[in-house]
Image (cartoon, helix red, strand yellow):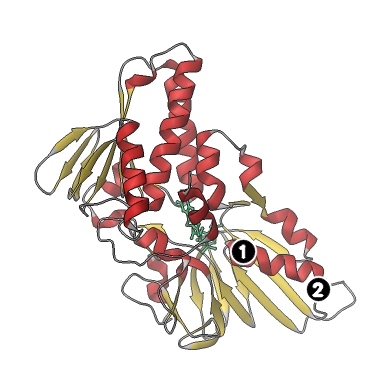
Amino acid sequence: MQTPEQPVLRDIVLVGGGHSHVGVLKRFAMNPVPGVRLTLICRDTHTPYSGMLPGYIAGHYSYDDVHIDLSRLAEYAGARFYRAEVTGLDRSNKRVICKGRPNVPYDLLSINIGSSPRVAEVVGASEHAVPVKPITGFNNRWLALLSRIENHDGPLTIAVVGAGAGGVELTLAMQFRLRNELTRRGKDPDQIHFHLFDAADQILPTHNAKVRAVFRDKLVHRGVKLHLGSAVSKVEQGLLTTESGQTLQTDEVLWVTRAGGPAWLNDTGLALDDGLFIRARDTLQTENDDNIFVAGDIANVINSSPGKSRCVCRSSGPAAGGQPAAHGHWQARQAL
Ligand SMILES: Cc1cc2nc3c(=O)[nH]c(=O)nc-3n(C[C@H](O)[C@H](O)[C@H](O)COP(=O)(O)OP(=O)(O)OC[C@H]3O[C@@H](n4cnc5c(N)ncnc54)[C@H](O)[C@@H]3O)c2cc1C
């Protein structure tokens, strides 16, 4: 931990409160490095453990159960915590540019900002669909949906776009919870209708045939209407249209498709791939800047096989570009 008596010899700045930075903070808390000043900059004070997110949606866990309080963790690690959104980098002066606060200088920088479904690729999706990430935005909309059904009577139709692991899990978790909520209020749970769309002609395209069959049966058994080989091409208020011209009137559209990096990375001069993921070497240093490291979904480690977290989200969408990642918690839930 940095104490007031120690001079700051090196500024390490962590951008984003993703899973890797949580681990870094914990390590620093246990093994402080004299002379190092650690700073965490994150848009949110609480970061979710995404493996437990479907359980939270289903009602098995509370908000606090699945979230890590970054300000407390930073305090424990003796780090500074700035709640701010990073909007750029001034690499020649080694500064992080933030919205609404002064730039933050760094000697070494690490980026762990996750990725988000690419809503901009489909007409109207940015305005009328709810992307599963950032999680805060999704959670706010989910809470609004929960309170909406308190007073709602009559049918409610929810469309989920993207039948990868995230889309399938979210569909089942939301349906479980909403049906329970309606039953608890003495209402008819069959009023909730779920539709799952994907451009591919099968669900879970990167999982094996047995897993696909189990979940296909489960979805059908639970009354989820599958629209496979159905790329969504337009979203309007209350209406979704596919490339073949099929339309569906919806109350809510959730977007769990192929993910990408944020547009601001374009102006950093860092080497990016087509999906705006940051290209990194085996050391996790970015391809063209030794002082900047990258981890988690936003990293594209160029020499590694494609088995990493971000592929889960990337592979879940219509383009199905990614490959499966062998993650413990995804795998464990497949047995459910
Ligand atoms: C429903 C669902 C279930 C999932 N289940 C699993 C699973 O079981 N197993 C698995 O491996 N993966 C799972 N995933 C995928 C998982 O979410 C990601 O792989 C994982 O969260 C990536 O972690 P990360 O550390 O890269 O970033 P994230 O966990 O996404 O964290 C990024 C952080 O950076 C912050 N941030 C972003 N942009 C900025 C900015 N500009 N300025 C400041 N801060 C910023 C965010 O607020 C956030 O705190 C699931 C995803 C979903 C949607």
Q: Secondary structure at mark 2?
A: loop
Mark 1: C-beta under 8 Å from nearest atom of ligand 1: yes
Instruction: Indicate which disc, 1 or 2, sits on the residue closer to the N terminus.
Output: 2
Q: Residue 320 in the image: state x and y as whole percent.
A: 28, 61
Q: Residue at x 51, y 16 (%)?
A: 184
Q: What amino acid is at disc 2?
A: Asn
In the current view of this chain or complex, which residue is farthest to the left?
245
Q: Is residue 255 left or right of residue 149?
A: left
Picture layout, residue 6 above or below residue 289 = above
The x, y position of residue 201, in whole percent, is: 20, 52
Q: What residue is at 27 percent from the left and 47 percent from the top?
A: 125
Task: Give the residue displayed 55% in from the left and 33% down from the top.
Answer: 59
Q: Residue furthest front?
A: 210
Residue 53 in the image, given as x and y percentages of width and height: 53, 45
**Three-letter residue code for mark 1:** Ile
The reply to whether residue 129 is visible in this rendering is no
Q: As drawn, is 52 to the left or to the right of 6?
A: left
Depth check: 132 or 39 in front?
Answer: 132
Which of pointers 1 and 2 indicates the residue nearer the eye?
Answer: 2
The N terminus - image quarter = bottom right
Which picture quadrant has residue 176?
top left
- Residue assigned mark 1: 41
Location of residue 197 (image quadrant): top left
Element under disc 1? strand
Residue 145, percent across and down? 43, 30
Q: Nearer the viewer, residue 134 or 26?
A: 26
Q: Which residue is mark 2?
A: 31
User: Which residue is most to the right?
Assistant: 5
Please tell me whether residue 255 is drawn above or below residue 310 in the rendered image.
above
Q: Is residue 248 left or right of residue 162?
A: left
Viewer-closest of 112 and 92: 112
